[in-house]
Amino acid sequence: MTYEDNIRKVTPYTPGEQPKTKVIKLNTNESPYPPSPRVVEAMEKLDWNKLRLYPDPAMSELTRCIADHYGVKPSEVFAGVGSDDVLSMCFLTFFAGEKPVLFPDITYSFYDVWAEVYRIPYETKKLDGDFRIVPSDYYAPNGGIVIANPNAPTGIGENRAFIEDILEHNSESVVIIDEAYVDFGAESALPLIEKYENLIVVRTMSKSRAMAGMRIGYCFGNEKLIKYLNDVKYSVNSYTLNIPSIAAGKAAIEDTEYFREIVGRIKKTRENTAEELKKLGFSYFPSDTNFIFAKPPAGYKAKDIFLKLKESGIYVRHFDKERISDYLRITIGTDDEMHMLIHTLKEILQ
């Protein structure tokens, strides 16, 4: 026996590549636009002397602002360092049973990593031939359910009635709906938290609010579930979000007009790009996200196109995994960036 026998070993999550040179970056679903101007104002007004102090562990100003915006109580909001931190705390808090946690086989690839890290039993349920969730797969006994809606990387969103059907069949376990991309088109499950006390709805400011660099995530649930989350958080790391992040998050949430403007621009560019991809022979699923999950025309391999785009300074995402290796996930950038993508794809296909 060696010291390595006592080390926890897992296969880590692989994030999208962060190139060090200037490229057209369409691989990590970041916003192509800057945060709200109010965020800049908040940073300029910040009392930097406060950085010598610990931040408010309850993040009271931010959670109150989020609660006001969404029409819930502050006690129904939990915030963390990006939705990854929030989801990690959810896994650690709510999935302590012996029955397996259920989630799709094609989804956000951090779910199985957290399950492995926390030694949580889990099973993946196969999406159907159209890459959609089969509801009856989630009627079985389980220790919890996690569904990304809209799904990543497919971009497919389900309506609220679909989510409610799963909730109705799972009153004895916590159901987590990961809504990282919901602002781009899908119907939110948030109104259901008042009806189902086992529901957690997770959001992020990284996508639609253009704040990936600040790492701000949050979730909603009934007061009992949020208390359980805070109990675990305070047992692991009391001070999560720092003072600048709290101020920036509050400013971003308050600027609804700017939020609607950039989301509208991204959705319009998404539809225009989808049409151009279709003209080139690509097939894709209707997207409720800020990316398009597209399959190249017959005779072309997704990985080859991925590499050729990279050589041209355009980064998209390719997953070398079963069932989805024939697809590219393309983040929606600015109109100019998407025009360059289409132009380069035309050259590659020729």
Image (cartoon, grey):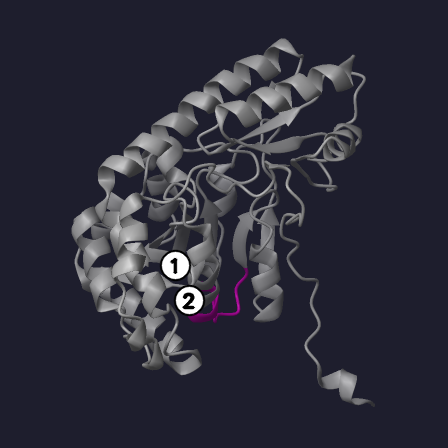
In this picture, residue 230 sits left or right of residue 236: left
Q: What residue does disc 1 label?
A: 174
Range of magenta residues: 90-100
* Relative to 101, residue 263 above or below: above
Q: CA distance from mark 1 to mark 2?
A: 7 Å
Picture coordinates of residue 306, whole percent (x, y): 73, 32
Name the image quarter holding the C terminus: top right
Position of residue 275 measured from the top left corner of the image (x, y, whole percent): 54, 13
Which quarter of the rendered picture does the N terminus lie within?
Answer: bottom right
Instruction: From the viewer's side, name the closer residue of 31 and 278.
Output: 31
Q: Residue at x 36, y 32 (%)?
A: 263
Q: Determine the image quadrant of residue 48.
A: bottom left
Could you tell me if the residues under marks 1 and 2 are in contact, i.e. CB atoms within 8 Å? yes
SS assignment at label 2:
helix
Does 47 appear above or below 334? below
Is residue 99 in the magenta section?
Answer: yes
Q: Quadrant of residue 225?
A: bottom left
The amino acid type, in three-letter code, at marker 1 is Val
Instruction: Indicate the amino acid at tag 2.
Output: Phe
Earlier in the chain: of badge 1 and badge 2, it is 2
Residue 286 in sight in this render: no
Mark 1 residue element:
loop
Q: Which residue does the numbered mark 2 point to in the structure image?
A: 94
Identify the residue at horizontal 64%, vertical 41% (top origin): 22
Q: Which percent across, then down, holds residue 117?
A: 60, 69
State the image coordinates of residue 292 (x, y, percent, origin top left): 55, 28
Q: Is residue 172 left or right of residue 254?
A: right
> Does the magenta run of residues contain 344?
no
